[in-house]
């Protein structure tokens, strides 16, 4: 069974994260598959894309078991290329979040153009709780998507924020009861598909360009801080503690 499933019908492509037994945690292989899906130019007949997930959790972030088994990656975060491909994808992307979207899952959802979530879903960035820190690119994308105050709350505290709160703040399109999630997401996807395709592509490109304000700023010193955190003993301890479901013992080194 494929861990990333792709289908298309009536001008709408559907991409499904399909690793429910692992809370749809993203492996390197899944990241590569998703990056390829969004890096390819969509067929002329497609008008919109819907990103969904199987099971009760939308995405728990990067696979920590895989992360613990290997050294911290040098350079860009493994999810960086996926988010770049997702943001620059020429058609609008709707995220349908039926359950929690944490860390990389949170970034994945909030980098879509529109987000429709279940009222039981939560969005969170738990990196500080396991000794990690987001790259410049990931922090900038969250800052743009959530706004300064909420980005600080999510990154510094690391606690999940209810979807209902994000809907109230206008960070996501809507939060609806479970039984309405499918019909509402279908309605929005069909509404997008009914719009003029050249207009959709022009607007999407304009919005992406408007969101690139942080990208040209120097941040080499910050990259060094992020790398130091990711390669620290605290990061190793934090990941192990999360996988073993116990409180971490951070030592600041």
Image (cartoon, rainbow, N blue to C red):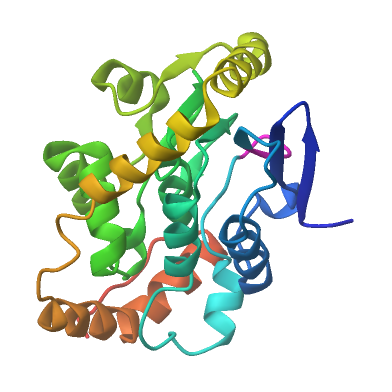
Residue 246 visible at all: no
Image quarter hosting the C terminus: bottom left
Q: Nearer the viewer, residue 144 or 197?
A: 197
- Looking at the image, the residue that sits furthest to the right is 1
- Identity of the residue drawn at 54% across and 31% down: 197
**Placement of the N terminus among the 4 image quadrants:** bottom right
- Could you tell me residue 25's position as x and y percent? 61, 57
Horizontal relation, residue 33 to residue 203: left or right: right
Residue 196, image x, y percentages: 52, 23
Residue 9 left/right relative to 200: right
Instruction: Give the left or right position of residue 129, taking residue 150 as reference.
Output: right
Image quadrant where residue 113 sits? top left
Residue 204 seen in render: yes
Is residue 136 placed above or below 71 in the rendered structure?
above
Q: Position of residue 146 (x, y in %)?
A: 25, 38
167 or 201, which is in the foreground?
201
Residue drawn at point x = 15 percent, y = 68 percent: 216
Identify the residue at horizontal 61%, vertical 76% (top origin): 66
Q: Is residue 160 above or below residue 65?
A: above
Q: Is residue 145 magenta?
A: no
Q: Which residues are magenta?
A: 51-57
Using the image, determine if residue 249 lies above or below residue 48: below
Which of the 4 image quarters holds residue 77? bottom left
Look at the picture and state if 60 lies above or below 28: above
Q: Which residue is located at x 52 percent, y 59 percent?
A: 245
Q: Position of residue 127 (x, y in %)?
A: 34, 61
């Amino acid at each position: 069974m494929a861990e990333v499933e792709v289908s298309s019908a009536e001008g709408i492509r559907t991409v499904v994260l399909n690793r429910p037994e692992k809370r749809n945690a993203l492996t390197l292989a899944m990241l590569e598959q998703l990056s390829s899906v969004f890096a390819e130019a969509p067929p002329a007949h497609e008008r919109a894309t819907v990103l969904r997930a199987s099971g009760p959790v939308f995405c728990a972030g990067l696979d920590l078991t895989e992360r613990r088994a290997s050294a911290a990656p040098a350079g860009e975060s493994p999810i960086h290329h996926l988010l770049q491909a997702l943001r620059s994808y020429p058609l609008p992307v709707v995220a349908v979040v039926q359950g929690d979207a944490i860390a990389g899952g949170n970034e994945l959802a909030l980098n879509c153009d529109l987000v429709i979530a279940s009222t039981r879903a939560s969005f969170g960035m738990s990196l500080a709780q396991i000794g990690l820190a987001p790259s410049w690119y990931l922090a900038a994308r969250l800052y743009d998507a959530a706004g300064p105050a909420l980005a600080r709350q999510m990154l510094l505290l690391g606690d999940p924020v209810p979807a209902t709160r994000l809907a109230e703040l206008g960070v996501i399109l809507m939060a609806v009861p479970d039984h309405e999630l499918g019909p509402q997401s279908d309605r929005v996807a069909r509404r997008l598909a009914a719009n003029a395709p050249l207009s959709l592509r022009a607007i999407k490109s304009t919005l992406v360009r408007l969101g690139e304000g942080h990208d040209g700023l120097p941040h080499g010193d910050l990259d060094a801080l992020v790398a130091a955190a990711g390669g620290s003993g605290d990061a190793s301890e934090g990941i192990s503690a999360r996988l073993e479901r116990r409180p971490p013992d951070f030592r600041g080194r």
